[in-house]
Image (cartoon, rainbow, N blue to C red):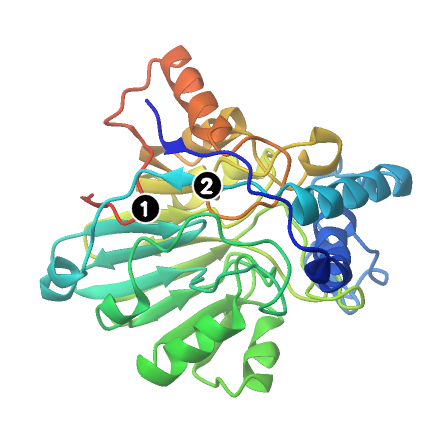
């Protein structure tokens, strides 16, 4: 199945190179070098806590060498500045009317990247909301959106809950969350450390949770769960805020949102403790080069291992086709996912690759 038509855009004018280099040095460094050390063990705290920050619990977790990270950073600067990808994903027209009129039917809509609109028991939930043109601290440079959002912000139904997995720019977008807070006034549910960030942005309706902690609101129970990733929005706040996946449980349906993660054995514990799930939304992109990405992002094949580990009935592909973040071709993640699904005898009814704007009942 073809999900896109696209190619490479023309080289950018010289006038744009200097600001792009400045900001992309920061963004690419966060992508490739974001495993800065935090302080030692925190007394009487869970094993993922450190004094002033957090760590991954997988004993095999390692960081790339400085040389490998530097090479990746320089290659991404060159690629994004001079040869930025373009894409034209097949889209589904969605004016939001059916979503605004829906009162009870469980649905899921892919907006793009890791942004989903989940409707459950009359509650409208967004995951990692992002409507900006770039995954960047500034609007003039940084990774550009390749695919427009599948639903206009103005066409959203009333948003009651927002789940955030971590603080990276492609998952936590300040203009978007500020607009949501102003227009929809949802409850933001976030991992430890992010409540203070939201407060600095003037957003106070926020609850933060540690791994395995739960919160019930508007009839929905949300449980913060482990993931294998890292955090940081500058070169000076690495791993100071927690990263997570999430379980969302309503009266009759159970949803898993993996956030952003590498594969490790911890997902089997999630499946045994809080599974099974009716639907699991799992990232399939940002895996090349493997020497940089293996520990913190899943390949499509690993994403299906998570799907099996958490004991889900249906798989929904996330984190692909939206931002030019890493080295794989835009259409490579769904192609590899389809091949592995066939190898595992999984059907298209079990493994979903939604088009931007597409809504499905679950």
221 or 289: nearer the viewer: 289
Up-down relation of residue 73 to residue 264 (above or below): below
Q: Which residue is mark 1?
A: 356
Q: Nearer the viewer, residue 303 or 2?
A: 2
The residue located at (75%, 62%) in the rendering is 238
Q: Quadrant of residue 67?
A: top right
Of residues 319 and 322, which is closer to you in this image? 322
User: Which residue is painted at 56% across and 63% down in the image?
Assistant: 210
Left or right of 248 on screen, residue 133: right
Residue in view at x 46 percent, y 30 percent: 331
Q: 201 above or below 215?
A: below
Q: Position of residue 201 (x, y in %)?
A: 55, 83
In the rendered structure, the answer to whether residue 269 lies left or right of residue 277 reads right
Q: Are marks 1 and 2 in contact (CB under 8 Å)?
A: yes
Q: Quadrant of the N terminus?
A: top left
Q: Is residue 223 above or below residue 289?
A: below
Residue at label 2?
Answer: 321
- On the image, which quarter does residue 223 sit in? bottom left
């Amino acid at each position: 199945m073809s999900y896109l038509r696209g190619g490479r855009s023309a080289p950018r004018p010289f006038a744009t190179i200097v600001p792009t280099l400045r900001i992309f040095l920061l963004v690419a460094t966060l992508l490739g070098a974001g495993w800065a050390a935090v302080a030692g063990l925190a007394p009487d705290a869970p094993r993922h806590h450190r004094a002033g920050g957090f760590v991954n619990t997988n004993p095999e977790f390692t960081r790339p060498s400085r040389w490998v990270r530097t090479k990746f950073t320089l290659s991404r600067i060159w690629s994004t500045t001079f040869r930025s990808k373009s894409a034209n994903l097949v889209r589904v027209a969605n004016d939001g009317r059916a979503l605004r009129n829906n009162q009870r039917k469980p649905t899921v809509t892919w907006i793009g990247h890791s942004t989903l609109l989940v409707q459950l028991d009359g509650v409208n939930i967004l995951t990692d909301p992002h409507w900006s043109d770039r995954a960047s601290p500034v609007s003039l440079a940084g990774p550009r959106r390749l695919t427009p959002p599948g639903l206009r912000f103005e066409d959203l139904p009333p948003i009651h809950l927002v789940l955030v997995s971590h603080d990276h720019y492609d998952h936590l977008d300040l203009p978007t969350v500020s607009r949501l807070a102003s227009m929809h006034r949802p409850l933001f549910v976030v991992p430890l450390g992010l409540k203070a960030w939201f407060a600095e942005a003037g957003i106070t309706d926020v609850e933060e949770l540690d791994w395995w902690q739960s919160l019930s609101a508007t009839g929905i129970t949300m449980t913060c769960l482990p993931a294998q990733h890292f955090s940081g929005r500058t070169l000076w706040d690495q791993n100071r805020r927690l990263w997570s996946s999430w379980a969302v449980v309503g009266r009759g349906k159970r949803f898993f949102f993996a956030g952003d993660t590498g594969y490790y054995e911890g997902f089997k514990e999630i499946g045994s403790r809080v599974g099974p799930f009716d639907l699991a939304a799992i990232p399939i992109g940002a895996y090349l080069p493997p020497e940089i990405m293996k520990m913190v992002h899943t390949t499509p094949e690993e994403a299906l291992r998570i799907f099996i580990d958490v004991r889900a009935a249906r798989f929904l592909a996330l984190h692909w086709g939206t931002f030019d973040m890493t080295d794989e071709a835009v259409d490579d993640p769904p192609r590899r996912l389809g091949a592995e699904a066939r190898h595992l005898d999984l059907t298209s009814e079990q493994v979903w690759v939604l088009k931007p704007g597409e809504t499905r009942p679950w």
